[in-house]
Amino acid sequence: MEFSRRDTLAMGLGAAALTVLPMRVFASATEDAIAAFTGGADMADEGVTLTAPEIAENGNTVPIEVSAPGASAIMVLAAGNPTPPVATFNFGPLAASQSASTRIRLAGTQDVVAIAKLADGSFARATSTVKVTIGGCGG
Amino acid sequence: MCVLGKKDSFMISRRDFLQVSMAASAMYGASGFGNWARLAAQQALTQDQLLEFDTFGNVSLIHVTDIHAQLKPIYFREPEINIGVGANKGQVPHVTGADFRKLYGIADGSPSAYALTYNDFAALAQGYGRVGGLDRVATVINAIRAARPDALLLDGGDTWHGSMTCYKTAGQDMVNVMNALKPDAMTFHWEFTLGSERVQEIVEGLPFAALGQNIFDAEWDEPAELFKPYKFFERGGVKIAVIGQAFPYMPIANPGWMFPEYSFGIRDENMQAMVDEVRAAGAELVVCLSHNGFDVDKKMASQVSGIDVILSGHTHDALPEPVLVGTTHIIASGSNGKFVSRVDLDVRDGRMMGLRHKLIPIFSDVIAPDAEIAALIDQQRAPYADELAEVIGQTDSLLYRRGNFNGSWDDLICDALMSEREADIAMSPGVRWGTSILPGQDITREDIFNVTSMTYPNAYRSEMTGEFIKVILEDVGDNIFNPDPYYQQGGDMVRVGGLGYRIDITKPQGERISDMTLLKTGEAIDPAKSYVVSGWASVNEGTEGPAIWDVVENHIRKQGTVTVAPNTSVQVIGA
């Protein structure tokens, strides 16, 4: 055994995260959280920007940024995590800009979702797929 | 290997074989064999022909990339299998062999056929000789500078990695020789595997710009101080901005623990911000020096507006013509010092009006070496001359690496791992560097390093369940065949020994791999059972085991002369 025991365990955990997690189960939790935030209103595709890496360098700490000019609140969800809601950023009327950045933990490859409540009371949605990989071999 | 549903890929078809015979007889002529044929082939080519170029416009760019520390001329066989997915299916650079020659009007057996396609490689290599060598590259650069003294020389990275001397000097041999070529800017990938401390030490002393708009400080997620996003140049009365784009997936594809201070990513929103910034500052020409890989560059060109030229590296593609996406021209300049791209541009009234391009193959027997650089190269190699030259064995087979699923070098490396480390299954990384050896040639220690050299070479021996082996194959498979290029890392499939499998590249991750078979027994891989696996180039810190080059050297020594049988253990569907 040339792999250290710790490495082998870490790789084993990565594998479990990639294969075993029943991502679909969390989909309804995500939709429920969104419905609670929007009251079931329709969501536009424009109005909120979500910036996230395409492939996470470290699934335990993935930097993301959301911004929605004029928004009063932006909710962020990790649709494939056991507990999808990540954070809701609320912006008061005196906020200089309606943007926020944070780091989130992702259990595996999944969609990160941002829902913004815009100034006129309507909602906008942005989705970005973040891949969590066990790593490979570069050219 | 067998690629189902792709006409041109399983062994050599009868038609190809006939063409090969004709090409060979034309080349060897009436004398049959020997030096006459070789001279005849070379006499058909001259340095003047290779350098011929009607200087155009007012700006010249010279692009070299992915040299992988190849100071001396080498053989390098281009891939037979290079499958595009999604919108890139059947698009360059995912066109190989006869299809490639047809697309660009290249005659079978011609110098371009030898330089750009895989067919009949061993015979054509006998005729046309080795390619590359930075002393020859220097001659080409000097000739371009004679025509355009203020031409920009831009290095796309993967320069300080890939040979024994580079490994032993921690990149210093390459730094010394490249500095003598006087580049204007560079971006990065494998350089970071020297470790962040060494990278910082070298970069701080570089007499040219070290660029990467996507090199960030990992802790603060802000641009890293050591690297600038872009640099302005004033050439031919034109204000030029060169924006760097380092390899986006460094900490994923390579060991992130070696450079924990840095974060990368594509960051195309920041690329757009940089383009807007340089345009606002008066840039009339915007050039992106990229290590994204070709398909990622194509997508980036469609997402980011305002880039005139992308000089593309990483995926080692060599294309005789630019690919146009919107108004962005993408140039692919090959690898291992085999090619230099010259791009002449006409920039007037604040915008690019025209472009002329030539992919110059570096035929080492045709292009005269630059004496000064040749001496400098020999000086770097002198302390290691005996070690480099030691003959370890011979080969009966053509040894090469490039191709999506396997190469004969990797088959040999996997055999070495299974035999020397007593493993059921071997894994070898799907990197795209690694030079070729012709049948009948000696294999020297230098040759072995050229396909194995790296700073994390330990050949581990571990137990893995069948389920976990499938996860690895699925994971790496998605890094190549995800239909969205932004989710691809630009390498090839992990090579396996002792294991057969079927891959349907059209399926999503988790469903591509099936029919995994342990070759030594012919039994299906049991997901619950553990297998002894040996591999190398693990990105995990603390991986233990002998260096892969020692494993391969021991194996070749025992064999004396190596023969690698065609690999038929991977079945590909959906190509």
Image: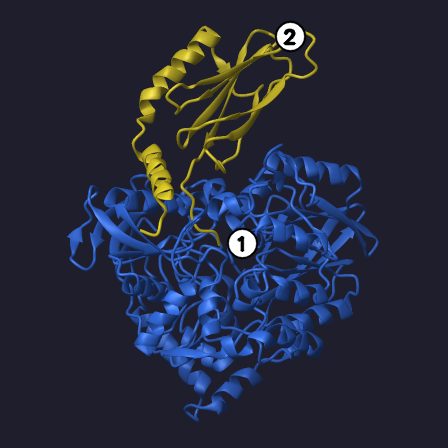
Q: Position of residue B65 (x, y in %)?
A: 59, 59
Q: Chain of mark 1?
A: B
x and y percent of residue B306 in the render? 68, 41
Q: Chain of mark 2?
A: A
Task: From the rendered image, report the letter of the chain displayed in yellow.
Answer: A
Q: Position of residue B424 (x, y in %)?
A: 24, 57
Question: Quadrant of residue B263 in the image?
Answer: top right
Q: Is any atom of residue A51 visible in this view?
A: no
Chain B image colour = blue
Q: What is the quadrant of residue B46 in the picture?
A: bottom right
Q: Is residue B65 above or below residue B147?
A: above
Task: Find numbered disc 1 in the image and state the secondary structure of the residue it sits on.
Answer: loop
Tell me, yes or no, whether the two marked residues, 1 and 2, touch with CB atoms within 8 Å.
no
**Marking on residue B314:** 1
Task: Give, as a three-letter code, the residue at label 1.
Answer: His
Judge from the rendering whether residue B433 lies leftward or rightward of residue A71; answer left or right: left
Any part of residue A65 in sight = yes
Name the residue carrying label 2.
A92
